[in-house]
Image (tube, rainbow, N blue to C red):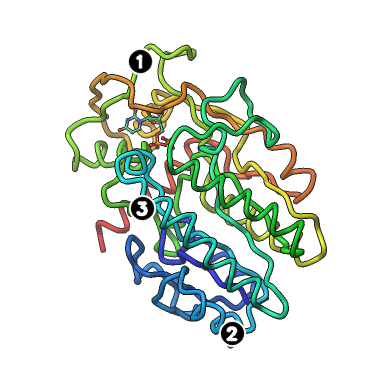
Protein backbone atom coordinates (compact mmCIF):
# COMPACT_ATOMS: atom_id res chain seq x y z
CA UNK A 1 0.00 0.00 0.00
CA UNK A 2 0.92 3.65 -0.39
CA UNK A 3 -0.13 5.29 2.83
CA UNK A 4 -0.37 8.97 3.72
CA UNK A 5 0.34 9.56 7.41
CA UNK A 6 -0.82 12.97 8.61
CA UNK A 7 0.91 14.00 11.80
CA UNK A 8 3.68 11.54 11.01
CA UNK A 9 6.18 13.70 12.90
CA UNK A 10 4.20 13.35 16.13
CA UNK A 11 4.23 10.72 18.85
CA UNK A 12 1.93 7.96 17.58
CA UNK A 13 2.29 9.04 13.93
CA UNK A 14 6.07 8.67 13.88
CA UNK A 15 5.77 5.17 15.33
CA UNK A 16 3.19 4.34 12.67
CA UNK A 17 5.55 5.42 9.89
CA UNK A 18 8.09 2.93 11.26
CA UNK A 19 5.49 0.16 11.49
CA UNK A 20 4.32 0.73 7.91
CA UNK A 21 7.86 0.79 6.55
CA UNK A 22 8.70 -2.39 8.43
CA UNK A 23 5.68 -4.03 6.76
CA UNK A 24 7.04 -2.91 3.34
CA UNK A 25 4.47 -0.21 2.63
CA UNK A 26 5.34 3.11 1.00
CA UNK A 27 4.81 6.11 3.25
CA UNK A 28 4.23 9.80 2.66
CA UNK A 29 4.12 12.02 5.75
CA UNK A 30 2.15 15.26 5.83
CA UNK A 31 2.87 17.36 8.91
CA UNK A 32 3.00 21.11 9.58
CA UNK A 33 5.59 20.62 12.36
CA UNK A 34 3.48 22.72 14.74
CA UNK A 35 4.07 20.13 17.47
CA UNK A 36 5.87 17.30 15.68
CA UNK A 37 9.58 16.76 15.17
CA UNK A 38 11.13 16.54 11.72
CA UNK A 39 13.85 14.23 13.04
CA UNK A 40 11.21 11.71 14.18
CA UNK A 41 10.30 10.95 10.56
CA UNK A 42 12.19 8.07 9.02
CA UNK A 43 14.31 9.10 6.02
CA UNK A 44 12.68 6.18 4.19
CA UNK A 45 9.37 8.07 4.13
CA UNK A 46 8.68 11.04 1.88
CA UNK A 47 8.14 14.11 4.03
CA UNK A 48 5.84 16.94 3.01
CA UNK A 49 5.59 19.95 5.30
CA UNK A 50 2.08 21.27 4.99
CA UNK A 51 -1.43 21.73 6.27
CA UNK A 52 -3.88 18.82 6.20
CA UNK A 53 -6.63 21.41 5.75
CA UNK A 54 -5.26 22.73 2.44
CA UNK A 55 -7.76 20.77 0.34
CA UNK A 56 -6.36 21.50 -3.13
CA UNK A 57 -2.78 20.70 -2.11
CA UNK A 58 -3.81 17.48 -0.39
CA UNK A 59 -5.97 16.45 -3.36
CA UNK A 60 -2.92 16.90 -5.61
CA UNK A 61 -0.76 14.92 -3.19
CA UNK A 62 -3.27 12.04 -3.09
CA UNK A 63 -3.35 11.96 -6.87
CA UNK A 64 0.38 12.39 -7.53
CA UNK A 65 1.40 9.86 -4.89
CA UNK A 66 -1.40 7.42 -5.77
CA UNK A 67 -2.34 7.12 -2.11
CA UNK A 68 -4.35 3.99 -1.19
CA UNK A 69 -5.01 4.79 2.44
CA UNK A 70 -4.67 7.59 4.98
CA UNK A 71 -3.87 7.41 8.68
CA UNK A 72 -4.98 10.76 10.07
CA UNK A 73 -3.07 11.50 13.27
CA UNK A 74 -2.55 15.25 12.88
CA UNK A 75 -4.46 16.91 15.73
CA UNK A 76 -4.38 18.96 18.88
CA UNK A 77 -4.46 16.65 21.90
CA UNK A 78 -4.53 18.58 25.18
CA UNK A 79 -7.82 18.36 27.02
CA UNK A 80 -7.16 21.32 29.30
CA UNK A 81 -5.98 23.52 26.44
CA UNK A 82 -9.17 22.65 24.55
CA UNK A 83 -11.19 24.16 27.39
CA UNK A 84 -9.21 27.43 27.48
CA UNK A 85 -8.59 27.70 23.72
CA UNK A 86 -11.44 25.80 22.02
CA UNK A 87 -10.92 27.51 18.65
CA UNK A 88 -7.68 25.55 18.26
CA UNK A 89 -9.68 22.35 18.59
CA UNK A 90 -12.74 23.12 16.49
CA UNK A 91 -10.53 24.60 13.79
CA UNK A 92 -7.52 22.31 14.18
CA UNK A 93 -9.32 19.02 14.69
CA UNK A 94 -12.77 19.40 13.13
CA UNK A 95 -12.44 22.00 10.37
CA UNK A 96 -9.06 20.70 9.16
CA UNK A 97 -10.28 17.08 9.18
CA UNK A 98 -13.34 18.05 7.15
CA UNK A 99 -11.10 19.88 4.68
CA UNK A 100 -8.90 16.78 4.43
CA UNK A 101 -12.01 14.67 3.78
CA UNK A 102 -12.96 17.03 0.93
CA UNK A 103 -9.69 16.06 -0.73
CA UNK A 104 -10.39 12.38 -0.05
CA UNK A 105 -13.86 12.56 -1.58
CA UNK A 106 -12.57 14.49 -4.60
CA UNK A 107 -10.31 11.56 -5.42
CA UNK A 108 -11.55 9.24 -8.22
CA UNK A 109 -10.76 6.28 -5.92
CA UNK A 110 -11.06 7.66 -2.39
CA UNK A 111 -8.40 6.20 -0.08
CA UNK A 112 -9.44 4.23 3.00
CA UNK A 113 -9.39 6.50 6.04
CA UNK A 114 -8.15 5.52 9.52
CA UNK A 115 -8.87 8.20 12.09
CA UNK A 116 -7.15 8.69 15.44
CA UNK A 117 -9.99 9.06 17.90
CA UNK A 118 -10.02 8.90 21.66
CA UNK A 119 -11.66 7.46 24.75
CA UNK A 120 -12.52 11.11 25.52
CA UNK A 121 -15.55 10.68 23.22
CA UNK A 122 -17.24 8.76 26.06
CA UNK A 123 -16.80 11.29 28.88
CA UNK A 124 -17.35 9.90 32.36
CA UNK A 125 -18.51 6.33 31.77
CA UNK A 126 -21.60 4.78 33.33
CA UNK A 127 -19.58 1.62 33.81
CA UNK A 128 -16.19 0.12 32.98
CA UNK A 129 -14.99 -1.55 30.88
CA UNK A 130 -16.42 0.74 28.20
CA UNK A 131 -17.68 -0.76 24.96
CA UNK A 132 -18.00 1.11 21.68
CA UNK A 133 -21.76 1.50 22.00
CA UNK A 134 -21.50 3.28 25.33
CA UNK A 135 -23.22 6.71 25.19
CA UNK A 136 -20.95 9.48 23.92
CA UNK A 137 -20.82 12.44 26.26
CA UNK A 138 -17.48 14.17 25.71
CA UNK A 139 -16.59 16.63 28.43
CA UNK A 140 -14.17 18.87 26.56
CA UNK A 141 -13.90 20.55 23.16
CA UNK A 142 -11.09 18.04 22.50
CA UNK A 143 -13.45 15.06 22.90
CA UNK A 144 -16.27 16.94 21.13
CA UNK A 145 -14.07 17.72 18.13
CA UNK A 146 -12.98 14.08 17.79
CA UNK A 147 -16.56 12.82 18.10
CA UNK A 148 -17.73 15.35 15.49
CA UNK A 149 -15.19 13.95 13.01
CA UNK A 150 -16.42 10.43 13.78
CA UNK A 151 -19.99 11.56 13.03
CA UNK A 152 -18.85 13.05 9.73
CA UNK A 153 -17.13 9.77 8.84
CA UNK A 154 -20.29 7.78 9.59
CA UNK A 155 -22.46 9.97 7.38
CA UNK A 156 -19.84 10.19 4.59
CA UNK A 157 -19.58 6.42 4.67
CA UNK A 158 -23.34 6.04 4.29
CA UNK A 159 -23.78 8.76 1.66
CA UNK A 160 -20.53 8.61 -0.34
CA UNK A 161 -19.20 5.13 0.32
CA UNK A 162 -16.16 6.39 2.25
CA UNK A 163 -14.32 3.48 3.92
CA UNK A 164 -13.24 4.46 7.42
CA UNK A 165 -12.17 3.24 10.84
CA UNK A 166 -12.19 5.39 13.98
CA UNK A 167 -9.69 4.08 16.50
CA UNK A 168 -10.43 5.25 20.02
CA UNK A 169 -7.17 5.23 21.92
CA UNK A 170 -7.19 4.86 25.65
CA UNK A 171 -3.86 5.99 27.20
CA UNK A 172 -1.12 5.75 24.58
CA UNK A 173 2.23 5.08 26.22
CA UNK A 174 5.63 3.46 25.70
CA UNK A 175 8.14 3.97 22.91
CA UNK A 176 10.19 2.27 20.22
CA UNK A 177 13.65 3.14 21.51
CA UNK A 178 15.44 0.94 18.96
CA UNK A 179 13.94 3.10 16.20
CA UNK A 180 14.90 6.24 18.15
CA UNK A 181 11.26 7.10 18.78
CA UNK A 182 9.41 8.13 21.91
CA UNK A 183 7.05 10.63 23.45
CA UNK A 184 8.15 14.29 23.20
CA UNK A 185 5.32 16.66 24.06
CA UNK A 186 5.96 20.24 25.06
CA UNK A 187 4.70 20.86 27.62
CA UNK A 188 4.40 17.27 28.80
CA UNK A 189 1.12 16.55 30.59
CA UNK A 190 1.02 12.75 30.41
CA UNK A 191 1.59 10.65 33.46
CA UNK A 192 4.27 8.15 32.40
CA UNK A 193 6.73 10.65 30.84
CA UNK A 194 6.28 12.92 33.86
CA UNK A 195 6.94 10.12 36.35
CA UNK A 196 10.04 9.15 34.34
CA UNK A 197 11.26 12.77 34.47
CA UNK A 198 10.92 12.62 38.24
CA UNK A 199 12.85 9.34 38.35
CA UNK A 200 15.52 10.90 36.11
CA UNK A 201 15.76 13.89 38.44
CA UNK A 202 14.68 16.47 35.86
CA UNK A 203 11.49 17.23 37.82
CA UNK A 204 11.43 17.44 41.60
CA UNK A 205 8.24 15.45 42.25
CA UNK A 206 5.03 14.05 40.83
CA UNK A 207 1.71 15.65 41.78
CA UNK A 208 -0.90 12.92 42.11
CA UNK A 209 -4.17 14.47 40.99
CA UNK A 210 -6.54 13.17 43.62
CA UNK A 211 -6.09 10.39 46.16
CA UNK A 212 -9.67 9.79 47.27
CA UNK A 213 -11.27 8.63 44.05
CA UNK A 214 -13.64 5.66 44.33
CA UNK A 215 -10.91 3.26 43.15
CA UNK A 216 -9.01 0.52 45.04
CA UNK A 217 -6.10 2.78 46.06
CA UNK A 218 -7.85 6.14 45.71
CA UNK A 219 -5.96 7.23 42.57
CA UNK A 220 -7.30 7.38 39.01
CA UNK A 221 -7.34 4.24 36.92
CA UNK A 222 -6.45 4.24 33.21
CA UNK A 223 -5.85 1.71 30.45
CA UNK A 224 -2.26 2.24 29.23
CA UNK A 225 -1.75 0.81 25.77
CA UNK A 226 1.69 0.49 24.17
CA UNK A 227 2.23 2.71 21.14
CA UNK A 228 3.59 -0.27 19.17
CA UNK A 229 0.35 -2.13 19.86
CA UNK A 230 -1.60 0.92 18.66
CA UNK A 231 0.39 0.86 15.43
CA UNK A 232 -0.33 -2.82 14.91
CA UNK A 233 -4.03 -2.04 15.34
CA UNK A 234 -3.80 0.63 12.63
CA UNK A 235 -2.18 -1.85 10.32
CA UNK A 236 -4.97 -4.34 11.04
CA UNK A 237 -7.59 -1.62 10.40
CA UNK A 238 -5.97 -0.73 7.06
CA UNK A 239 -5.93 -4.38 5.99
CA UNK A 240 -9.54 -4.74 7.10
CA UNK A 241 -10.67 -1.74 5.02
CA UNK A 242 -8.71 -2.50 1.86
CA UNK A 243 -10.01 -6.07 1.86
CA UNK A 244 -13.60 -4.85 1.99
CA UNK A 245 -14.22 -4.90 5.74
CA UNK A 246 -17.01 -2.76 7.17
CA UNK A 247 -16.36 0.74 8.47
CA UNK A 248 -16.60 1.05 12.26
CA UNK A 249 -15.20 2.50 15.46
CA UNK A 250 -12.93 0.42 17.70
CA UNK A 251 -11.59 0.83 21.21
CA UNK A 252 -7.84 0.38 21.45
CA UNK A 253 -6.75 -0.54 24.94
CA UNK A 254 -5.56 -3.52 26.92
CA UNK A 255 -8.77 -4.10 28.84
CA UNK A 256 -6.81 -3.69 32.09
CA UNK A 257 -6.86 -0.68 34.37
CA UNK A 258 -3.85 0.63 36.34
CA UNK A 259 -3.87 3.27 39.03
CA UNK A 260 -1.52 6.24 39.24
CA UNK A 261 0.15 4.53 42.21
CA UNK A 262 0.65 1.34 40.17
CA UNK A 263 2.36 3.42 37.48
CA UNK A 264 4.64 5.01 40.10
CA UNK A 265 5.52 1.57 41.49
CA UNK A 266 6.32 0.28 37.98
CA UNK A 267 8.60 3.26 37.37
CA UNK A 268 10.41 2.64 40.67
CA UNK A 269 10.87 -1.05 39.78
CA UNK A 270 12.07 -0.41 36.24
CA UNK A 271 14.39 2.51 36.95
CA UNK A 272 15.55 1.57 40.45
CA UNK A 273 15.08 5.25 41.33
CA UNK A 274 12.94 7.02 43.89
CA UNK A 275 9.84 8.98 42.86
CA UNK A 276 8.91 11.72 45.33
CA UNK A 277 5.16 12.47 45.20
CA UNK A 278 2.88 15.27 46.31
CA UNK A 279 -0.82 14.71 46.83
CA UNK A 280 -2.62 17.34 44.78
CA UNK A 281 -6.31 18.10 44.19
CA UNK A 282 -8.07 16.30 41.32
CA UNK A 283 -7.53 17.76 37.85
CA UNK A 284 -10.65 19.25 36.24
CA UNK A 285 -12.42 16.84 33.95
CA UNK A 286 -10.59 13.64 34.99
CA UNK A 287 -12.96 10.64 35.32
CA UNK A 288 -12.05 8.15 38.08
CA UNK A 289 -11.70 5.15 35.82
CA UNK A 290 -11.32 4.58 32.06
CA UNK A 291 -10.82 1.03 30.86
CA UNK A 292 -11.55 -0.30 27.38
CA UNK A 293 -13.65 -3.26 26.45
CA UNK A 294 -11.54 -4.60 23.62
CA UNK A 295 -13.58 -7.46 22.18
CA UNK A 296 -14.69 -5.67 19.02
CA UNK A 297 -11.15 -5.00 17.77
CA UNK A 298 -10.25 -8.57 18.63
CA UNK A 299 -13.22 -10.05 16.80
CA UNK A 300 -13.31 -7.81 13.74
CA UNK A 301 -9.67 -6.78 13.25
CA UNK A 302 -8.00 -9.80 14.83
CA UNK A 303 -5.98 -7.40 16.97
CA UNK A 304 -5.23 -7.42 20.63
CA UNK A 305 -2.57 -5.60 22.62
CA UNK A 306 0.49 -7.81 23.17
CA UNK A 307 2.61 -5.56 25.42
CA UNK A 308 0.16 -5.57 28.28
CA UNK A 309 2.51 -5.58 31.26
CA UNK A 310 2.87 -2.11 32.73
CA UNK A 311 6.56 -2.79 33.30
CA UNK A 312 7.04 -3.37 29.55
CA UNK A 313 5.40 -0.05 28.69
CA UNK A 314 7.46 1.77 31.32
CA UNK A 315 10.70 -0.02 30.40
CA UNK A 316 10.35 0.98 26.74
CA UNK A 317 9.51 4.59 27.61
CA UNK A 318 12.50 4.69 29.97
CA UNK A 319 14.83 3.17 27.33
CA UNK A 320 13.83 5.98 24.97
CA UNK A 321 14.44 8.63 27.62
CA UNK A 322 17.88 7.25 28.47
CA UNK A 323 18.80 7.03 24.79
CA UNK A 324 17.47 10.54 24.01
CA UNK A 325 19.53 11.95 26.87
CA UNK A 326 22.69 10.28 25.60
CA UNK A 327 21.74 11.92 22.29
N1 LIG B 1 -1.88 12.32 36.47
C1 LIG B 1 -1.33 12.67 37.71
N2 LIG B 1 -0.30 13.55 37.73
C2 LIG B 1 0.26 14.09 36.61
C3 LIG B 1 -0.30 13.70 35.34
C4 LIG B 1 -1.36 12.82 35.32
O1 LIG B 1 -1.79 12.22 38.76
O2 LIG B 1 1.19 14.90 36.70
C5 LIG B 1 -3.00 11.36 36.42
C6 LIG B 1 -4.26 11.92 35.78
O3 LIG B 1 -5.08 12.52 36.75
C7 LIG B 1 -4.89 10.68 35.16
C8 LIG B 1 -3.71 9.78 34.85
O4 LIG B 1 -2.59 10.30 35.60
O5 LIG B 1 -5.66 10.01 36.10
C9 LIG B 1 -3.35 9.77 33.38
O6 LIG B 1 -3.22 11.10 32.93
P1 LIG B 1 -2.70 11.47 31.51
O7 LIG B 1 -2.64 12.98 31.42
O8 LIG B 1 -1.45 10.72 31.22
O9 LIG B 1 -3.81 10.91 30.53
P2 LIG B 1 -5.42 11.14 30.47
O10 LIG B 1 -6.03 9.95 31.11
O11 LIG B 1 -5.72 12.43 31.17
O12 LIG B 1 -5.67 11.20 29.01
Judge by depth and name the residue closer to the eye, 175 or 87.
Answer: 87
Where's residue 45, x and y in %?
Answer: 50, 78
Rendered residue at 59%/84% (across/down) = 65
Q: Are marks 2 and 3 in contact (CB under 8 Å)?
A: no
Question: Mark 1 or mark 3: which comes first in sequence?
Answer: 3
Residue 110 in the figure: left or right of residue 281 = right
- The residue tagged 2 is 65
Q: Nearer the viewer, mark 1 or mark 2?
A: 2
Residue 99 in the figure: left or right of residue 25 = left
Question: Mark 2 or mark 3: which comes first in sequence?
Answer: 2
Where's residue 187, x and y in %?
Answer: 26, 48
Q: Are marks 1 and 2 in contact (CB under 8 Å)?
A: no
Ligand 1 sits in which quadrant?
A: top left
- The residue tagged 1 is 211
Q: Residues within 10 Å of mark 3 (few under 14, many from 20)?
A: some
- The residue tagged 3 is 88
Secondary structure under the numbered disc 2 in the rendered image: loop
Amino acid sequence: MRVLVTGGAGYVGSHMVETLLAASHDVVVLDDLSTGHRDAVSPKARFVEGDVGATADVAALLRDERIDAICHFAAKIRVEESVSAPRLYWQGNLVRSLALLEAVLASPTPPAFVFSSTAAVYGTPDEVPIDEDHPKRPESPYGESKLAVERALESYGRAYGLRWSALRYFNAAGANAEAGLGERHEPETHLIPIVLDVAAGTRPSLSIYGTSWPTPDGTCVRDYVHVSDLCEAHLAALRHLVTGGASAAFNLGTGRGRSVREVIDAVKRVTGRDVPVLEAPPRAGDPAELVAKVERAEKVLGWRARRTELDTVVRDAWAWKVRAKQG
